[in-house]
Image: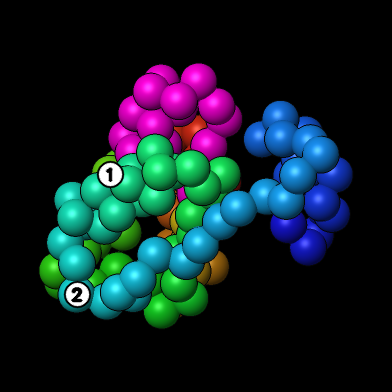
Amino acid sequence: GPPHGIQVERDKLNKYGRPLLGCTIKPKLGLSAKNYGRAVYECLRGGLDFTKDDENVNSQPFMRWRDRFLFCAEAIYKAQAETGEIKGHYLNATAGTSEEMIKRAVCARELGVPI
């Protein structure tokens, strides 16, 4: 992404010579974590290279951040196994405090999912 440039993203995804295809998952609010993960899976399985959280997707009572992270990671790995391609999802790890944000970033790293 912007901090690294397109070449780093292409290297991570092993995609060259064509545009990278991605989208923001919608609706941004209202889905359960499981259904959100399913939307990520369907997009990646359908041919997108990556998906991303909307900036408003954080941690709501109907979709807690940890559950969202887990279902998104599962979706990525399932889509990769089925397509044979490297896929990605950019998680929104923002939080009310820097300590909480670091906790979320560490969780994402442990799952192997970028933020």
Q: Residue at x 30, y 74 (%)?
A: 27
Identify the residue under disc 2: 30
Sequence-earlier tag: 2 or 1: 2
Magenta-colored segment: predominant secondary structure: helix
Tell me the amino acid under the disc marked 2: Gly
Residue 18 position within the rendered picture, expressed as x and y whole percent measured from the top left:
76, 44
Residue 10 position within the rendered picture, expressed as x and y whole percent measured from the top left:
76, 40
The answer to whether 21 appears left or right of 110 in the picture is: right
Question: Is 59 one of the magenta-colored residues?
Answer: no
Q: Secondary structure at mark 2?
A: loop
Of residues 43 and 70, the one drawn nearer to the viewer in this rendering = 43
Q: Secondary structure at mark 1?
A: helix
Residue 70 position within the rendered picture, expressed as x and y whole percent measured from the top left:
30, 42
Residue 81 position within the rendered picture, expressed as x and y whole percent measured from the top left:
41, 21
Q: Quadrant of residue 76?
A: top left
Magenta region: 74-89
Label 1 crowd (10 A; few <14 / some 14-19 / many >=20): some
Identify the residue under disc 1: 71
The answer to whether 32 appears left or right of 97 in the picture is: left
Marks 2 and 1 sit apart, C-alpha to C-alpha, by: 15 Å
Residue 46 in sight in this render: yes
Of residues 109 and 68, the one drawn nearer to the viewer in this rendering = 68
Q: Residue at x 48, y 42 (%)?
A: 47
Q: Give the total number of marks visible in the rendering.
A: 2
Label 2 crowd (10 A; few <14 / some 14-19 / many >=20): some
Tell me the amino acid under the disc marked 1: Phe
The colour scheme used here is rainbow
Q: Is residue 39 above or below residue 30?
A: above
The answer to whether 46 appears left or right of 1 in the picture is: left
